[in-house]
Image (cartoon, grey):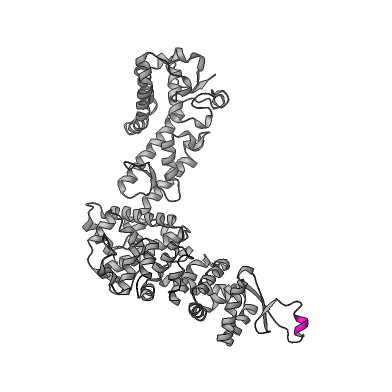
Protein backbone atom coordinates (compact mmCIF):
# COMPACT_ATOMS: atom_id res chain seq x y z
CA UNK A 1 0.00 0.00 0.00
CA UNK A 2 3.02 2.26 0.01
CA UNK A 3 3.96 4.40 -2.96
CA UNK A 4 5.15 2.22 -5.81
CA UNK A 5 6.02 2.83 -9.43
CA UNK A 6 4.71 -0.08 -11.46
CA UNK A 7 6.36 -0.89 -14.78
CA UNK A 8 3.96 -3.09 -16.69
CA UNK A 9 6.59 -3.94 -19.30
CA UNK A 10 8.50 -5.99 -16.72
CA UNK A 11 8.24 -9.71 -17.30
CA UNK A 12 7.96 -10.40 -13.58
CA UNK A 13 4.72 -8.40 -13.48
CA UNK A 14 3.33 -10.33 -16.41
CA UNK A 15 4.19 -13.61 -14.71
CA UNK A 16 2.30 -12.80 -11.53
CA UNK A 17 -0.46 -15.27 -10.60
CA UNK A 18 -3.95 -14.16 -11.65
CA UNK A 19 -5.06 -13.10 -8.15
CA UNK A 20 -1.95 -10.96 -7.54
CA UNK A 21 -2.12 -9.48 -11.02
CA UNK A 22 -5.77 -8.53 -10.40
CA UNK A 23 -4.62 -6.36 -7.48
CA UNK A 24 -1.60 -4.82 -9.23
CA UNK A 25 -3.54 -3.93 -12.36
CA UNK A 26 -5.90 -1.69 -10.37
CA UNK A 27 -3.14 0.93 -10.32
CA UNK A 28 -3.53 1.46 -14.06
CA UNK A 29 -6.00 3.89 -15.66
CA UNK A 30 -9.25 2.08 -16.46
CA UNK A 31 -8.84 1.53 -20.21
CA UNK A 32 -5.20 0.48 -19.89
CA UNK A 33 -6.31 -1.79 -17.06
CA UNK A 34 -8.81 -3.54 -19.32
CA UNK A 35 -6.24 -3.91 -22.10
CA UNK A 36 -3.67 -5.33 -19.69
CA UNK A 37 -6.17 -7.92 -18.45
CA UNK A 38 -7.32 -8.94 -21.93
CA UNK A 39 -3.70 -9.34 -23.05
CA UNK A 40 -3.24 -12.14 -20.53
CA UNK A 41 -3.70 -15.74 -21.64
CA UNK A 42 -5.53 -16.33 -18.36
CA UNK A 43 -7.75 -13.24 -18.67
CA UNK A 44 -10.78 -15.16 -17.37
CA UNK A 45 -8.91 -16.11 -14.20
CA UNK A 46 -7.71 -12.53 -13.68
CA UNK A 47 -11.21 -11.10 -14.10
CA UNK A 48 -12.78 -13.64 -11.76
CA UNK A 49 -10.03 -13.05 -9.20
CA UNK A 50 -10.94 -9.37 -8.96
CA UNK A 51 -12.90 -8.42 -5.82
CA UNK A 52 -16.50 -7.70 -6.77
CA UNK A 53 -16.23 -3.97 -6.27
CA UNK A 54 -12.90 -3.63 -8.09
CA UNK A 55 -14.44 -5.36 -11.10
CA UNK A 56 -17.56 -3.23 -10.92
CA UNK A 57 -15.54 -0.01 -10.61
CA UNK A 58 -13.40 -1.02 -13.59
CA UNK A 59 -16.49 -1.64 -15.73
CA UNK A 60 -18.02 1.69 -14.75
CA UNK A 61 -14.78 3.63 -15.30
CA UNK A 62 -14.31 2.12 -18.77
CA UNK A 63 -18.02 2.55 -19.56
CA UNK A 64 -20.53 -0.34 -19.48
CA UNK A 65 -20.80 -0.75 -23.24
CA UNK A 66 -17.08 -0.33 -23.89
CA UNK A 67 -16.35 -2.88 -21.16
CA UNK A 68 -18.30 -5.68 -22.88
CA UNK A 69 -15.09 -7.73 -23.50
CA UNK A 70 -14.52 -7.72 -19.72
CA UNK A 71 -18.17 -8.41 -18.95
CA UNK A 72 -18.10 -11.49 -21.17
CA UNK A 73 -15.44 -12.97 -18.85
CA UNK A 74 -17.21 -12.13 -15.57
CA UNK A 75 -18.44 -14.68 -13.08
CA UNK A 76 -22.11 -14.98 -12.21
CA UNK A 77 -21.36 -13.50 -8.78
CA UNK A 78 -19.79 -10.45 -10.45
CA UNK A 79 -22.86 -10.04 -12.67
CA UNK A 80 -25.17 -10.28 -9.66
CA UNK A 81 -23.10 -7.58 -7.95
CA UNK A 82 -23.45 -5.27 -10.97
CA UNK A 83 -27.24 -5.66 -10.90
CA UNK A 84 -27.18 -4.97 -7.15
CA UNK A 85 -25.23 -1.76 -7.68
CA UNK A 86 -27.01 -0.45 -10.76
CA UNK A 87 -30.64 -1.48 -10.46
CA UNK A 88 -31.63 0.00 -7.10
CA UNK A 89 -32.41 3.53 -5.97
CA UNK A 90 -32.40 3.41 -2.18
CA UNK A 91 -34.97 0.67 -1.48
CA UNK A 92 -36.70 0.69 -4.88
CA UNK A 93 -35.87 -1.28 -8.00
CA UNK A 94 -35.09 0.72 -11.15
CA UNK A 95 -36.49 -1.48 -13.96
CA UNK A 96 -35.13 0.66 -16.81
CA UNK A 97 -31.55 0.20 -15.59
CA UNK A 98 -32.26 -3.48 -15.03
CA UNK A 99 -33.39 -4.20 -18.57
CA UNK A 100 -30.46 -2.22 -20.01
CA UNK A 101 -28.07 -4.41 -18.01
CA UNK A 102 -29.98 -7.53 -19.03
CA UNK A 103 -29.33 -6.52 -22.63
CA UNK A 104 -25.59 -6.21 -21.93
CA UNK A 105 -25.66 -9.58 -20.18
CA UNK A 106 -27.30 -11.18 -23.22
CA UNK A 107 -24.68 -9.59 -25.49
CA UNK A 108 -21.94 -10.96 -23.24
CA UNK A 109 -22.99 -14.49 -24.22
CA UNK A 110 -25.57 -17.24 -23.87
CA UNK A 111 -23.81 -19.04 -21.02
CA UNK A 112 -23.44 -15.96 -18.74
CA UNK A 113 -27.12 -15.14 -19.30
CA UNK A 114 -28.30 -18.66 -18.46
CA UNK A 115 -26.10 -18.85 -15.36
CA UNK A 116 -27.40 -15.49 -14.15
CA UNK A 117 -31.05 -16.45 -14.72
CA UNK A 118 -30.68 -19.55 -12.57
CA UNK A 119 -28.52 -18.01 -9.84
CA UNK A 120 -29.91 -14.51 -9.37
CA UNK A 121 -32.06 -14.08 -6.28
CA UNK A 122 -35.63 -15.18 -7.08
CA UNK A 123 -37.55 -12.22 -5.65
CA UNK A 124 -35.30 -9.76 -7.49
CA UNK A 125 -35.86 -11.57 -10.79
CA UNK A 126 -39.62 -11.66 -10.23
CA UNK A 127 -39.74 -7.98 -9.25
CA UNK A 128 -37.85 -7.08 -12.41
CA UNK A 129 -39.99 -9.23 -14.69
CA UNK A 130 -43.20 -7.83 -13.18
CA UNK A 131 -42.03 -4.35 -14.15
CA UNK A 132 -40.69 -5.36 -17.57
CA UNK A 133 -43.81 -7.17 -18.80
CA UNK A 134 -47.53 -7.51 -18.15
CA UNK A 135 -48.54 -11.18 -17.94
CA UNK A 136 -52.06 -12.65 -18.32
CA UNK A 137 -53.00 -16.33 -18.02
CA UNK A 138 -55.25 -17.73 -20.74
CA UNK A 139 -58.77 -18.38 -19.35
CA UNK A 140 -59.72 -22.08 -19.31
CA UNK A 141 -63.36 -21.53 -20.23
CA UNK A 142 -62.87 -19.44 -23.37
CA UNK A 143 -61.73 -20.60 -26.80
CA UNK A 144 -58.21 -19.41 -27.62
CA UNK A 145 -59.36 -17.80 -30.87
CA UNK A 146 -61.81 -15.62 -28.97
CA UNK A 147 -59.37 -14.91 -26.15
CA UNK A 148 -56.73 -13.58 -28.57
CA UNK A 149 -58.84 -10.47 -29.09
CA UNK A 150 -58.14 -9.18 -25.58
CA UNK A 151 -55.05 -11.12 -24.42
CA UNK A 152 -51.57 -9.53 -24.64
CA UNK A 153 -49.96 -10.12 -28.05
CA UNK A 154 -47.08 -12.49 -27.16
CA UNK A 155 -46.92 -16.07 -25.88
CA UNK A 156 -44.56 -19.01 -26.01
CA UNK A 157 -46.85 -21.78 -24.80
CA UNK A 158 -50.40 -20.47 -25.45
CA UNK A 159 -50.80 -20.41 -21.67
CA UNK A 160 -49.05 -17.23 -20.48
CA UNK A 161 -49.55 -14.15 -22.63
CA UNK A 162 -47.42 -11.05 -22.18
CA UNK A 163 -46.64 -7.63 -23.53
CA UNK A 164 -43.39 -5.73 -23.00
CA UNK A 165 -43.44 -2.36 -21.26
CA UNK A 166 -40.15 -1.55 -23.01
CA UNK A 167 -40.90 -2.08 -26.72
CA UNK A 168 -37.26 -1.61 -27.75
CA UNK A 169 -36.37 -4.67 -25.67
CA UNK A 170 -39.21 -6.91 -26.82
CA UNK A 171 -36.90 -9.35 -28.65
CA UNK A 172 -34.66 -9.53 -25.58
CA UNK A 173 -37.58 -10.44 -23.30
CA UNK A 174 -38.75 -13.09 -25.78
CA UNK A 175 -35.21 -14.51 -25.84
CA UNK A 176 -35.01 -14.66 -22.03
CA UNK A 177 -38.44 -16.25 -21.61
CA UNK A 178 -37.62 -18.77 -24.35
CA UNK A 179 -34.45 -19.80 -22.51
CA UNK A 180 -36.41 -20.35 -19.31
CA UNK A 181 -39.16 -22.23 -21.16
CA UNK A 182 -36.73 -24.51 -23.02
CA UNK A 183 -34.30 -25.23 -20.19
CA UNK A 184 -36.65 -25.60 -17.21
CA UNK A 185 -40.37 -25.35 -17.84
CA UNK A 186 -41.19 -25.73 -14.15
CA UNK A 187 -39.07 -22.70 -13.28
CA UNK A 188 -40.53 -20.77 -16.22
CA UNK A 189 -44.05 -21.56 -15.00
CA UNK A 190 -43.22 -20.54 -11.42
CA UNK A 191 -41.87 -17.20 -12.63
CA UNK A 192 -44.91 -16.49 -14.80
CA UNK A 193 -47.31 -17.44 -12.00
CA UNK A 194 -45.56 -15.04 -9.62
CA UNK A 195 -45.60 -12.37 -12.32
CA UNK A 196 -49.39 -12.69 -12.37
CA UNK A 197 -50.28 -13.29 -8.73
CA UNK A 198 -47.34 -12.00 -6.70
CA UNK A 199 -47.89 -8.76 -4.82
CA UNK A 200 -45.52 -6.09 -6.09
CA UNK A 201 -44.77 -4.62 -2.66
CA UNK A 202 -44.09 -8.02 -1.04
CA UNK A 203 -41.84 -9.17 -3.88
CA UNK A 204 -39.82 -5.96 -3.84
CA UNK A 205 -39.56 -5.92 -0.05
CA UNK A 206 -38.13 -9.45 -0.02
CA UNK A 207 -35.79 -8.60 -2.90
CA UNK A 208 -34.53 -5.57 -1.00
CA UNK A 209 -33.87 -7.61 2.14
CA UNK A 210 -31.61 -10.00 0.23
CA UNK A 211 -30.06 -7.15 -1.78
CA UNK A 212 -29.14 -5.30 1.40
CA UNK A 213 -27.57 -8.42 2.89
CA UNK A 214 -25.44 -9.10 -0.19
CA UNK A 215 -24.11 -5.55 -0.22
CA UNK A 216 -23.38 -5.60 3.52
CA UNK A 217 -21.25 -8.69 2.90
CA UNK A 218 -19.17 -6.48 0.58
CA UNK A 219 -18.92 -3.59 3.09
CA UNK A 220 -21.43 -1.59 1.05
CA UNK A 221 -24.23 -0.04 3.16
CA UNK A 222 -27.66 0.92 1.96
CA UNK A 223 -28.44 4.63 1.64
CA UNK A 224 -29.97 5.06 5.09
CA UNK A 225 -27.11 3.31 6.89
CA UNK A 226 -24.57 5.27 4.84
CA UNK A 227 -25.90 8.58 6.18
CA UNK A 228 -24.45 7.75 9.62
CA UNK A 229 -20.99 8.53 8.25
CA UNK A 230 -21.81 12.23 8.57
CA UNK A 231 -22.46 12.06 12.32
CA UNK A 232 -19.46 13.85 13.91
CA UNK A 233 -17.48 12.32 16.75
CA UNK A 234 -15.47 13.96 19.51
CA UNK A 235 -11.93 12.61 20.08
CA UNK A 236 -12.95 11.66 23.64
CA UNK A 237 -15.59 9.26 22.23
CA UNK A 238 -13.07 7.20 20.27
CA UNK A 239 -12.35 3.68 21.54
CA UNK A 240 -8.92 2.29 20.62
CA UNK A 241 -9.95 -1.35 20.42
CA UNK A 242 -9.49 -2.32 16.77
CA UNK A 243 -6.43 -4.55 17.22
CA UNK A 244 -8.27 -7.07 19.39
CA UNK A 245 -10.68 -7.79 16.52
CA UNK A 246 -8.10 -8.13 13.73
CA UNK A 247 -7.15 -11.72 14.51
CA UNK A 248 -10.80 -12.77 14.70
CA UNK A 249 -11.73 -11.10 11.40
CA UNK A 250 -9.30 -12.21 8.67
CA UNK A 251 -9.79 -10.38 5.39
CA UNK A 252 -9.75 -12.18 2.06
CA UNK A 253 -8.96 -10.15 -1.08
CA UNK A 254 -10.20 -6.72 0.06
CA UNK A 255 -11.14 -4.30 -2.74
CA UNK A 256 -8.28 -1.98 -3.62
CA UNK A 257 -10.02 0.83 -5.54
CA UNK A 258 -9.91 3.26 -2.60
CA UNK A 259 -6.35 2.63 -1.44
CA UNK A 260 -5.00 2.99 -4.98
CA UNK A 261 -6.25 6.58 -5.03
CA UNK A 262 -4.56 7.26 -1.69
CA UNK A 263 -1.19 6.13 -2.97
CA UNK A 264 -0.96 9.35 -4.96
CA UNK A 265 -0.66 11.36 -1.73
CA UNK A 266 2.18 12.20 0.65
CA UNK A 267 -0.01 13.29 3.57
CA UNK A 268 0.11 12.03 7.16
CA UNK A 269 -2.35 9.20 6.46
CA UNK A 270 -0.28 7.79 3.59
CA UNK A 271 3.00 8.16 5.50
CA UNK A 272 1.47 6.43 8.52
CA UNK A 273 0.34 3.53 6.32
CA UNK A 274 3.90 3.21 5.10
CA UNK A 275 5.03 2.54 8.69
CA UNK A 276 2.72 -0.49 9.06
CA UNK A 277 4.37 -3.77 8.05
CA UNK A 278 1.84 -6.34 9.27
CA UNK A 279 0.08 -7.65 6.14
CA UNK A 280 -3.09 -8.66 8.00
CA UNK A 281 -3.42 -5.18 9.48
CA UNK A 282 -2.87 -3.56 6.08
CA UNK A 283 -5.52 -5.75 4.46
CA UNK A 284 -7.97 -4.94 7.25
CA UNK A 285 -7.31 -1.21 6.79
CA UNK A 286 -7.76 -1.67 3.04
CA UNK A 287 -11.20 -3.19 3.65
CA UNK A 288 -12.05 -0.41 6.12
CA UNK A 289 -11.03 2.19 3.58
CA UNK A 290 -13.26 0.65 0.91
CA UNK A 291 -16.17 0.50 3.38
CA UNK A 292 -15.65 4.13 4.37
CA UNK A 293 -15.42 5.25 0.75
CA UNK A 294 -18.61 3.32 -0.04
CA UNK A 295 -20.48 5.07 2.76
CA UNK A 296 -19.46 8.50 1.52
CA UNK A 297 -20.19 7.67 -2.13
CA UNK A 298 -23.64 6.27 -1.33
CA UNK A 299 -24.55 8.99 1.18
CA UNK A 300 -23.59 11.63 -1.42
CA UNK A 301 -25.63 9.72 -4.04
CA UNK A 302 -22.74 9.69 -6.48
CA UNK A 303 -23.04 7.31 -9.40
CA UNK A 304 -19.99 5.14 -9.87
CA UNK A 305 -19.69 5.94 -13.56
CA UNK A 306 -19.27 9.64 -12.78
CA UNK A 307 -15.48 9.50 -12.51
CA UNK A 308 -15.08 13.18 -11.60
CA UNK A 309 -17.51 13.08 -8.66
CA UNK A 310 -16.15 9.70 -7.62
CA UNK A 311 -12.63 11.11 -7.50
CA UNK A 312 -13.94 14.04 -5.44
CA UNK A 313 -15.58 11.64 -2.95
CA UNK A 314 -12.37 9.67 -2.52
CA UNK A 315 -10.41 12.89 -2.06
CA UNK A 316 -12.91 13.96 0.60
CA UNK A 317 -12.32 10.66 2.41
CA UNK A 318 -8.55 11.07 2.18
CA UNK A 319 -8.57 14.71 3.33
CA UNK A 320 -10.91 14.14 6.28
CA UNK A 321 -9.06 11.02 7.40
CA UNK A 322 -5.88 13.05 7.34
CA UNK A 323 -7.53 15.81 9.38
CA UNK A 324 -8.89 13.32 11.93
CA UNK A 325 -5.53 11.59 12.18
CA UNK A 326 -3.82 14.91 12.90
CA UNK A 327 -6.35 15.64 15.65
CA UNK A 328 -6.00 12.22 17.30
CA UNK A 329 -2.19 12.28 17.05
CA UNK A 330 -1.80 15.53 18.99
CA UNK A 331 0.51 16.40 20.61
CA UNK A 332 3.60 15.19 18.78
CA UNK A 333 2.13 14.50 15.34
CA UNK A 334 4.39 12.14 13.38
CA UNK A 335 3.97 9.09 11.09
CA UNK A 336 4.88 6.60 13.84
CA UNK A 337 2.26 7.83 16.32
CA UNK A 338 -0.27 8.12 13.49
CA UNK A 339 0.46 4.50 12.48
CA UNK A 340 -0.40 3.38 16.02
CA UNK A 341 -3.72 5.18 15.74
CA UNK A 342 -4.47 3.49 12.40
CA UNK A 343 -3.84 0.11 14.03
CA UNK A 344 -6.06 0.82 17.03
CA UNK A 345 -8.85 3.15 15.86
CA UNK A 346 -11.44 2.36 13.20
CA UNK A 347 -11.10 4.49 10.07
CA UNK A 348 -14.75 5.49 10.26
CA UNK A 349 -14.13 6.97 13.71
CA UNK A 350 -11.04 8.83 12.47
CA UNK A 351 -13.12 10.25 9.61
CA UNK A 352 -15.89 11.36 11.97
CA UNK A 353 -13.36 12.98 14.31
CA UNK A 354 -12.10 14.97 11.32
CA UNK A 355 -15.67 15.83 10.44
CA UNK A 356 -16.48 17.31 13.86
CA UNK A 357 -14.57 20.66 13.53
CA UNK A 358 -15.79 21.01 9.95
CA UNK A 359 -19.42 20.71 11.02
CA UNK A 360 -18.86 23.38 13.67
CA UNK A 361 -17.19 25.62 11.11
CA UNK A 362 -20.04 25.16 8.65
CA UNK A 363 -22.71 25.83 11.28
CA UNK A 364 -20.99 29.04 12.33
CA UNK A 365 -20.74 30.26 8.74
CA UNK A 366 -24.41 29.47 8.05
CA UNK A 367 -25.52 31.25 11.23
CA UNK A 368 -23.62 34.33 10.09
CA UNK A 369 -25.28 34.23 6.67
CA UNK A 370 -28.79 33.29 7.80
CA UNK A 371 -29.06 35.12 11.13
CA UNK A 372 -26.07 37.47 11.49
CA UNK A 373 -25.18 40.82 9.97
CA UNK A 374 -25.10 39.37 6.45
CA UNK A 375 -28.77 38.40 6.80
CA UNK A 376 -29.62 41.96 7.91
CA UNK A 377 -27.77 43.55 4.99
CA UNK A 378 -30.00 44.34 1.98
CA UNK A 379 -27.36 42.87 -0.36
CA UNK A 380 -26.83 39.66 1.60
CA UNK A 381 -23.57 37.91 0.75
CA UNK A 382 -23.07 40.17 -2.27
CA UNK A 383 -21.78 42.81 0.15
CA UNK A 384 -18.59 40.74 0.50
CA UNK A 385 -15.61 41.17 -1.79
CA UNK A 386 -15.25 38.24 -4.24
CA UNK A 387 -12.47 36.59 -2.22
CA UNK A 388 -14.50 36.72 0.98
CA UNK A 389 -17.74 35.74 -0.78
CA UNK A 390 -16.02 32.61 -2.08
CA UNK A 391 -14.60 31.86 1.38
CA UNK A 392 -17.99 32.09 3.13
CA UNK A 393 -19.84 30.31 0.34
CA UNK A 394 -17.48 27.31 0.48
CA UNK A 395 -17.92 27.05 4.25
CA UNK A 396 -21.70 27.03 3.82
CA UNK A 397 -21.61 24.00 1.52
CA UNK A 398 -23.02 20.72 2.94
CA UNK A 399 -19.39 19.64 3.32
CA UNK A 400 -17.29 22.75 4.12
CA UNK A 401 -14.33 23.50 1.88
CA UNK A 402 -11.57 26.07 1.59
CA UNK A 403 -10.01 27.99 -1.29
CA UNK A 404 -6.63 26.36 -1.95
CA UNK A 405 -3.78 28.56 -3.17
CA UNK A 406 -0.97 26.69 -4.94
CA UNK A 407 1.90 28.46 -6.74
CA UNK A 408 1.55 28.32 -10.49
CA UNK A 409 -2.21 27.71 -10.66
CA UNK A 410 -5.44 29.55 -9.99
CA UNK A 411 -7.08 29.14 -6.55
CA UNK A 412 -9.44 26.16 -6.41
CA UNK A 413 -11.93 24.66 -3.92
CA UNK A 414 -10.40 21.92 -1.79
CA UNK A 415 -11.07 19.95 1.38
CA UNK A 416 -9.60 20.75 4.79
CA UNK A 417 -6.65 18.46 5.52
CA UNK A 418 -4.96 19.85 8.66
CA UNK A 419 -6.13 21.43 11.94
CA UNK A 420 -4.13 24.57 11.10
CA UNK A 421 -6.39 25.12 8.09
CA UNK A 422 -9.47 24.87 10.29
CA UNK A 423 -7.96 27.37 12.75
CA UNK A 424 -7.15 29.75 9.92
CA UNK A 425 -10.74 29.52 8.66
CA UNK A 426 -12.02 30.31 12.17
CA UNK A 427 -9.79 33.40 12.21
CA UNK A 428 -11.09 34.47 8.82
CA UNK A 429 -14.68 34.03 9.99
CA UNK A 430 -13.87 36.38 12.85
CA UNK A 431 -12.68 38.85 10.22
CA UNK A 432 -16.00 38.53 8.37
CA UNK A 433 -17.75 39.20 11.67
CA UNK A 434 -15.65 42.39 11.97
CA UNK A 435 -16.89 43.49 8.56
CA UNK A 436 -20.35 43.51 10.08
CA UNK A 437 -19.16 45.80 12.89
CA UNK A 438 -17.73 48.14 10.25
CA UNK A 439 -20.92 48.10 8.18
CA UNK A 440 -23.15 48.66 11.21
CA UNK A 441 -21.05 51.72 12.13
CA UNK A 442 -21.50 53.31 8.69
CA UNK A 443 -24.66 55.18 7.78
CA UNK A 444 -25.67 53.72 4.42
CA UNK A 445 -28.45 55.48 2.44
CA UNK A 446 -29.48 52.31 0.60
CA UNK A 447 -32.40 53.90 -1.26
CA UNK A 448 -30.27 56.81 -2.48
CA UNK A 449 -27.56 54.46 -3.67
CA UNK A 450 -30.08 52.28 -5.46
CA UNK A 451 -31.58 55.24 -7.33
CA UNK A 452 -28.66 57.61 -7.87
CA UNK A 453 -25.49 55.63 -8.55
CA UNK A 454 -23.60 56.92 -11.58
CA UNK A 455 -24.16 54.22 -14.20
CA UNK A 456 -20.92 54.94 -16.04
CA UNK A 457 -18.81 54.31 -12.95
CA UNK A 458 -17.13 51.12 -11.77
CA UNK A 459 -20.25 50.32 -9.72
CA UNK A 460 -23.20 50.70 -12.04
CA UNK A 461 -25.51 48.72 -9.76
CA UNK A 462 -26.06 48.56 -6.02
CA UNK A 463 -25.55 44.79 -6.30
CA UNK A 464 -21.85 45.38 -7.04
CA UNK A 465 -21.16 47.40 -3.88
CA UNK A 466 -18.99 45.86 -1.14
CA UNK A 467 -18.05 46.72 2.46
CA UNK A 468 -14.70 48.24 1.48
CA UNK A 469 -16.29 50.55 -1.11
CA UNK A 470 -18.83 51.77 1.43
CA UNK A 471 -16.01 52.32 3.96
CA UNK A 472 -13.85 54.34 1.56
CA UNK A 473 -16.83 56.32 0.25
CA UNK A 474 -17.95 57.12 3.81
CA UNK A 475 -14.38 58.07 4.79
CA UNK A 476 -14.14 60.40 1.78
CA UNK A 477 -17.44 62.07 2.67
CA UNK A 478 -16.34 62.49 6.30
CA UNK A 479 -12.93 63.88 5.35
CA UNK A 480 -14.15 66.29 2.66
CA UNK A 481 -17.07 67.62 4.71
CA UNK A 482 -15.16 67.49 8.00
CA UNK A 483 -17.82 65.40 9.72
CA UNK A 484 -17.01 62.69 12.28
CA UNK A 485 -19.93 60.54 11.15
CA UNK A 486 -19.14 58.08 8.34
CA UNK A 487 -21.96 58.28 5.79
CA UNK A 488 -21.59 56.40 2.51
CA UNK A 489 -22.87 59.24 0.35
CA UNK A 490 -21.58 58.98 -3.24
CA UNK A 491 -19.23 61.61 -4.65
CA UNK A 492 -20.75 63.92 -7.30
CA UNK A 493 -18.87 63.33 -10.55
CA UNK A 494 -18.77 67.08 -11.20
CA UNK A 495 -16.84 67.61 -7.93
CA UNK A 496 -14.36 64.76 -8.46
CA UNK A 497 -11.49 66.90 -9.74
CA UNK A 498 -11.85 69.21 -6.74
CA UNK A 499 -12.28 66.39 -4.20
CA UNK A 500 -9.55 64.03 -5.40
CA UNK A 501 -6.59 66.04 -3.97
CA UNK A 502 -8.26 65.87 -0.54
CA UNK A 503 -8.20 62.05 -0.64
CA UNK A 504 -4.42 61.70 -0.66
CA UNK A 505 -3.34 58.46 1.08
CA UNK A 506 -1.52 60.49 3.74
CA UNK A 507 -4.88 62.00 4.74
CA UNK A 508 -7.43 59.31 3.91
CA UNK A 509 -5.71 56.24 5.36
CA UNK A 510 -5.02 57.70 8.85
CA UNK A 511 -8.59 59.00 8.87
CA UNK A 512 -9.91 55.48 8.21
CA UNK A 513 -7.62 53.91 10.80
CA UNK A 514 -8.61 56.43 13.47
CA UNK A 515 -12.30 55.82 12.81
CA UNK A 516 -11.81 52.03 12.93
CA UNK A 517 -9.93 52.24 16.23
CA UNK A 518 -12.89 54.10 17.74
CA UNK A 519 -15.65 51.88 16.33
CA UNK A 520 -13.99 48.47 16.58
CA UNK A 521 -12.93 47.92 20.18
CA UNK A 522 -10.52 45.30 21.50
CA UNK A 523 -7.05 44.19 20.46
CA UNK A 524 -8.23 40.91 18.93
CA UNK A 525 -10.94 42.61 16.84
CA UNK A 526 -8.46 45.29 15.77
CA UNK A 527 -6.20 42.52 14.49
CA UNK A 528 -9.02 41.11 12.36
CA UNK A 529 -9.91 44.57 11.05
CA UNK A 530 -6.31 45.17 10.04
CA UNK A 531 -6.08 41.82 8.25
CA UNK A 532 -9.15 42.80 6.23
CA UNK A 533 -8.35 46.44 5.52
CA UNK A 534 -4.62 46.19 4.82
CA UNK A 535 -4.92 44.63 1.37
CA UNK A 536 -7.45 47.32 0.37
CA UNK A 537 -5.15 50.08 1.64
CA UNK A 538 -2.26 48.53 -0.28
CA UNK A 539 -4.37 48.51 -3.44
CA UNK A 540 -5.30 52.17 -2.90
CA UNK A 541 -1.63 53.13 -2.50
CA UNK A 542 -0.66 51.16 -5.58
CA UNK A 543 -3.41 52.45 -7.87
CA UNK A 544 -3.98 56.01 -6.66
CA UNK A 545 -0.43 56.86 -5.55
CA UNK A 546 0.96 57.42 -9.08
CA UNK A 547 -1.80 59.96 -9.86
CA UNK A 548 -0.91 62.01 -6.78
CA UNK A 549 2.76 61.88 -7.65
CA UNK A 550 2.06 63.12 -11.18
CA UNK A 551 -0.50 65.68 -10.02
CA UNK A 552 -3.22 64.12 -12.19
CA UNK A 553 -6.85 63.23 -11.52
CA UNK A 554 -7.90 59.71 -12.58
CA UNK A 555 -10.95 59.17 -14.75
CA UNK A 556 -13.81 58.48 -12.28
CA UNK A 557 -15.14 55.76 -14.58
CA UNK A 558 -12.20 53.52 -13.62
CA UNK A 559 -11.92 54.34 -9.91
CA UNK A 560 -13.01 51.31 -7.86
CA UNK A 561 -12.58 52.72 -4.33
CA UNK A 562 -15.49 55.19 -4.29
CA UNK A 563 -19.12 55.42 -5.32
CA UNK A 564 -20.18 58.27 -7.61
CA UNK A 565 -23.41 60.03 -8.41
CA UNK A 566 -24.29 62.21 -11.41
Q: State the image coordinates of residue 311 (x, y, percent, origin top left).
A: 40, 56
Q: How many marks?
A: 0
- Residue at image position (31%, 70%) is 21
Q: State the image coordinates of residue 520 (x, y, percent, origin top left).
A: 38, 29
Describe residue 204's horizontal placement relative to residue 545 as left or right: right
Question: Which region shows up in magenta?
Answer: 144-151
Q: Is residue 150 above or below residue 445?
A: below
Please name whichever residue, 293 or 105, is drawn nearer the observer in this view of the structure: 105
Residue 231 seen: no
Would you identify the image quadrant in which residue 334 lies?
bottom left
Please name whichever residue, 522 or 403, is drawn nearer the observer in this view of the structure: 403
In magenta segment, residue 261: no
In magenta segment, residue 146: yes
Location of the N terminus (image quadrant) = bottom left
Q: Is residue 560 above or below residue 199?
A: above
Location of the C terminus (image quadrant) = top right
Residue farthest right in this picture: 146
- Residue at image position (49%, 70%) is 83
Q: Is residue 400 above or below residue 294?
A: above
Q: State the image coordinates of residue 142 (x, y, percent, origin top left).
A: 77, 85
Describe residue 195's horizontal placement relative to residue 505 as left or right: right
Q: Is residue 73 above or below residue 393?
A: below
Q: State the image coordinates of residue 78 (x, y, percent, origin top left).
A: 44, 73
Amino acid sequence: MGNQIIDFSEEKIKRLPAAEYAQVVMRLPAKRRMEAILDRADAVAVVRSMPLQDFYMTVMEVGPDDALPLLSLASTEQWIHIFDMECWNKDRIVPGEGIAWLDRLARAGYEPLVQWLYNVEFFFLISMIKQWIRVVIRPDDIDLTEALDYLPPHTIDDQYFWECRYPQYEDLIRHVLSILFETNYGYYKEIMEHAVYGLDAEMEEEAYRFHKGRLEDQAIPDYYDALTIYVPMEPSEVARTKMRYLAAEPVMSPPSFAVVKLEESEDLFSRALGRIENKAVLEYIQLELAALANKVIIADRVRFQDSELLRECLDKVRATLNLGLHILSRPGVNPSSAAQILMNVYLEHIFRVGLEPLKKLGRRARRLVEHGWIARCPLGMNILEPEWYEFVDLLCQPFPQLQRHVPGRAPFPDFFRRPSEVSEAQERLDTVLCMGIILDSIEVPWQELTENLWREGHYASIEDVTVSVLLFTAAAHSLVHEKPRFTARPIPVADWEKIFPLLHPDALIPHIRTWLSINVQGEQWQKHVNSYIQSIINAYLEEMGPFYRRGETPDPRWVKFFLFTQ
